[in-house]
Amino acid sequence: MSYKNNTEKTRVQLPAMIHLLRLGYTYLSISNNSKNNINIDKETNIEVNIFKNQFEKLNPNSDLTTEKILRDIKWSLNNDDLGRDFYNNLISQNIKLVDFENINNNVFHFAAELEYSHDNESFRPDITIFINGLPLAFIEVKIPNNKDGQLAEEKRMNDLRISNKKFKRFFNLTQLMIFSNNMEYSDNGSKSSGSFYCTGANKKVFFNRFIEEPIKNDPNYFYNNFVYNDIPVDIEKSILSDFNSKNILNTSEYETNKSYLTNTNKILTSLCSKERILFFIKYGIAYLNSEREEDGKKITINQKHIARYQQLFACLAVKEKLDKGIKSGIIWHTQGSGKTALSYYLVKFLTNYFSKKNKVAKFYFIVDRIDLLEQAKQEFETRGLSVKTAENKKELLEQFSNYNASEGNAGRTEIVVVNIQRFSEHDKDIKLPPYSTNLQRVLIIDEAHRSYNIKGSFLANLINIDKDSIKIALTGTPLLKDEWTSMQIFGDYIHTYYYDKSINDGYTLKIIREDIDTYYKNNLKEISKESSLYVQKNEFKKSFLKENDNYVNELLRYIIKDFYRFRKVNNDNTLGAMIICDSSGQAKKINDKFDEIQKEISNEIDEEVNFKKGLILHDVDDKETRKKVVADFKKNFKIDILIVYNMLLTGFDAPRLKRLYFGRKLKAHNLLQAITRVNRPYKDMKYGYVIDFVDIKENFDETNEKYLNELKRFNTGLSDEYSNKFQNIFLSKEEIQEKVKRAENAIFPIYHGNLEEFNNSIYRKDKKELLEIKDILEDAKGCYNIARSFFDSSFRNEFKNLEIEEISQMISLLYKRISFINFQETENKGQEIKLITNEILSNIKFNFVLASKEEMKIISNELNDKIQEIERSLSNQVDKNEPTFISLQELIFSKLNEYKYKEINSVHEYEKILKDISALNEKLNDVQKKEENLLKCRITCILSLFLNI
């Protein structure tokens, strides 16, 4: 039959409606409402008859009438709160509008082209989804290669719908919106093609991709193994009849378009299958209320977010682990992908998870810095949680002894944000009073790549606070094998989400590195020769150079001029910058000199340059002042450039920060954490920028290689090194006993229970001996913490002859003595060296010049994805006996085996293998296309012969 109706309706919309029948939805034909007993309330689009029946079914003992509930819903939908009041009632179980626990107690319907109309303005989504009569979702579809792609849909939503206050009621009620042009996603992160989802917003919706979690390396596993309903033939014909499209019923094109594996139908299965849509609505919605200053007034900002797909799958992965009895593990989600938001969704989900088991979940969010504590506190309060903090030892114990999981009559879920340093205040085990078996503590450890050494007392106290607690570690850069690995400390990975996917999904930006060459009028090598007459190499401090007035002045000239140009080029004065200084002293000098240099530049270019800067150092200003500086940069836009040394390099989330001036060398995960401060999406920026004064490229490449091998290890299974992680963590009991004996022998001659006498005795020892004693004591302390954390209490008897409680004090006294000796050795000569250095540097003219630009490609999972793609292509080959295919298959297997057993030692090697695999995949696709074309030709010939008979 001819397929003439080649339209959006026949190619995408109708096949999507038929697919909803597969998912168990019932069709509402609105072409004749009275005939079909359909009663749509035009003010809200609630189907009143269905709503009434379901409300009475779910609330048999309620005194409230359906009419009263509908009036209350309409009233709440008038609020300027993005539907928050309605949403809270929707997920409440006091009066049930939806039964989230028993899916089959609900009814699911869909209608097509239902008009959303108010005050003579209207729009008609292609498909509206009803749950218990409530229109909680809608779907918009387009044909492939539609004009301007999905960007046109996003623009239409933002310019004509979301911003139109006449549609407020409808969007306050709608929780989920889906948009698809039935195409694959673009590789470059563009929103021109693909299937997207979002929720309501005040001004601008954000289109999210949804990519189903591969299972057994098969991206379609979920769809292929989903239990679909049979399509009722009479309902299918009725739908086609309603849209005057009965003629497409038996066409091959129609059969192709209603496949459950079309791109539109896949996202419907992922988001609208009954269990998924209820999960998203209950656990995947977040309302954010925040404030910022504008012209001296406080402005309230309301936002509504929906969970990203990786956050959904992380929650489900945590559930899977808990169901298996696994109580700890790591979520490795790349920096900037929303780990704090994930924590909020986990709190919502796990509260209900444990409630079903008759347990009360109490949540603790563990950070390792005071600024991150403040940031986490704000983020959770913004999302409506009741946040408690512990300022001291007493408050910490009170929080762990308090078993309430919600606050006051409002019943807001509570989370305790704790700085892990508080755990270090206890050298003994923290003893908590016994509690009933219905309490479950959940510890979410933020930035699990720092401060968690297995030998440290921080971790030992964290583990011992409650050995039955759930411990979920979050990181964007897990520790690797040359350090204490994250896996060794917290267990295996629960879920992963890599940098390449985050860029493609639009959650993070690519990063451009600008390499800066530093030129000097005089040759520094000659200066070094001259200096060597006076100075030993190890006595010259780098800070003498980097804090010199000449150096600082020219560095500032470059930075201020560069940032001025950057804002002009981008025509955006809200863009922010950060200077990472080489030392605390340099940061202070840059701060002192900033306004002076800025004024000079203004005079030079005859234009006003008036950047406001903020200095963040731990020893400058008090906590409240630093807190205000951060707020003025992040929220209030009163500060343009932050000057830092070692604060705000990790965990600091400010989307407007787009220019990072790198004046300090960092390594490993610290480097990745720092450079990704600029990768948050902001307005229409395509990149974040790192301005490199210290040549971080070598360290960056080295770190990238380590993460490449970590990704490879994770994707190909545990290596022998990780096959028994506890063997890696623990010293044997014999080894611990040996170290304890060494410590006893070291302490016995100099410590007899009196710390003052101990202090006097170490005064007479030289530095080498003091260093040896210090190392032995630190070793013993680390062994004790391991024993406390992972061995039974009886083994601690090994330490009975050691005064463990006083070892920390002894180590502290040793440190002070060693530091004082160092000071005495360098005091006089240090000042002399500094004077000589300054005299030499005063004759040097520094000059900073842009040398090159390049993208900083953080290692991703792309290679593994390519290999999975080529494996699928091999299995899909039409004619596996074709000679060209056989020879190509042998070559592919050879390359795959080479990769499998080869250690990749450089990014260059990684990119070469990636290029080889991609080339082989292209060849394989060419062979497949030829085979498919040949097959089509054969079929055409056979049909021609048949039709001519």
Image: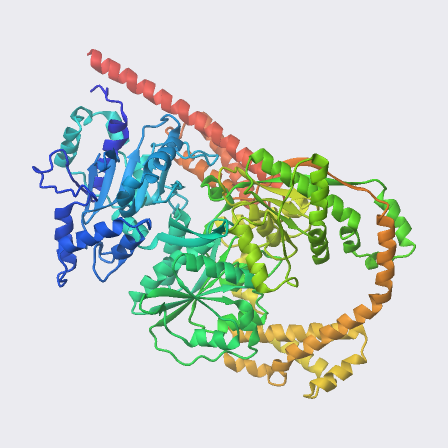
Question: Where does residue 538 sit, x and y in percent of width and height?
Answer: 82, 58
Q: Nearer the viewer, residue 285 or 465?
A: 285
Decide: is 64 above or below 162: below
Q: Residue furthest top?
A: 948
Q: Quadrant of the C terminus?
A: top left
The answer to whether any part of residue 450 appears in the image is no
The answer to whether any part of residue 351 appears in the image is yes
Q: Is residue 147 left or right of residue 822?
A: left
Q: Is residue 725 left or right of residue 934?
A: right
Q: Nearer the viewer, residue 923 or 443?
A: 443
Q: Quadrant of residue 151?
A: top left
Question: Where does residue 896 sit, x and y in percent of width and height?
Answer: 52, 39
Q: Nearer the viewer, residue 522 or 173?
A: 173
Residue drawn at (36%, 64%) of the image: 413
Q: Residue furthest right?
A: 533
Q: Is residue 208 left or right of residue 835?
A: left
* Number of residue marks: 0
Q: Residue furthest front?
A: 296
Question: Where does residue 845 sit, x and y in percent of width and height?
Answer: 82, 42
Residue drawn at (18%, 28%) of the image: 243
Decide: is 937 above or below 517: above
Question: Where does residue 775 sit, x and y in percent of width and height?
Answer: 70, 72
Residue drawn at (36%, 26%) of the image: 146
Q: Quadrant of the N terminus?
A: top left
Decide: is 241 above or below 505: above
Q: Quadrant of residue 778?
A: bottom right
Q: Quadrant of residue 225?
A: top left
Q: Nearer the viewer, residue 652 or 1?
A: 652
How is this picture coloured? rainbow
Decide: is 442 above or below 4: below
